[in-house]
Amino acid sequence: MNAAWAYPFIFAAGMLQAVGAAMGGQLNKSLHNPWLATSISFMLVMFTTVALFACMPKPLPSVGDFAQMPWWAPLGGVVGAVAVFAGFMLIQKLGAGPVNGVTITANIIASLAIDHYGLLRMEQHAMNPYRLVGAVLMIAGVTLIAKF
């Protein structure tokens, strides 16, 4: 993907994530069971992913690629499921703004730590005053959104 499209694509994905959280909250409300709602949501994701993989199966990893993969790498989906489940459970009660705001702010704070320390084999990007002020502004903004 061309770098010029990266930020608009991420922006659109973020907007869709907010819409998806609200849709998931309604799914949970309709089904009265967050486990069932999460399962249905992930089954549709799995179906879509498998269908897209069938259409575009290349490139495929080698045996060596699997051997070099960290044991924890496949757990990213499970970690994401926690966020989806939390959103399904709480979005109807708290609203889309607070749930997505806290989720995104927590994501940024954790990302800054991952960047700073180079955790999970990520390239290091040192914490600096501008990044710290950005995180504080995110906290302040989401506090205002949740409070009012």
Image (cartoon, grey):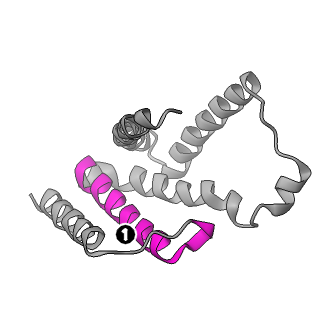
Residue 99 pos. (x, y %): 30, 55
Residue 28 pos. (x, y %): 43, 44
Q: Residue furthest top?
A: 55
Answer with the quarter of the image where residue 19 lies.
top left
Q: Main secondary structure of the magenta part?
A: helix
Question: In this rendering, would 148 be left or right of 146?
Answer: left
Q: Is residue 99 depicted above or below 20 in this figure?
A: below
Residue shown at 55%/54% (left/top)?
81
Q: Residue furthest left?
A: 148
- How many numbered marks does the figure carry? 1
Per the rendered image, the range of residues in magenta is: 96-122
Question: In this rendering, would 142 be left or right of 30?
Answer: left
Depth order, front residue of 124/52: 124
Answer with the quarter of the image where residue 10 lies.
top left
Instruction: Assign a secondary structure to mark 1.
Output: helix
Residue shown at 32%/62% (left/top)?
105
Q: Is residue 110 magenta?
A: yes
Identified by mark 1, the residue type is Ile
Q: Is residue 139 depicted above or below 18 in this figure?
A: below
Judging by the rendered image, the residue that carries numbered circle 1 is: 109
Residue shown at 27%/54% (left/top)?
93
Q: Is residue 95 magenta?
A: no
Neighbours of disc 1 within 10 Å: few (<14), some (14-19), many (20+): some
Question: In this rendering, would 15 be left or right of 84?
Answer: left
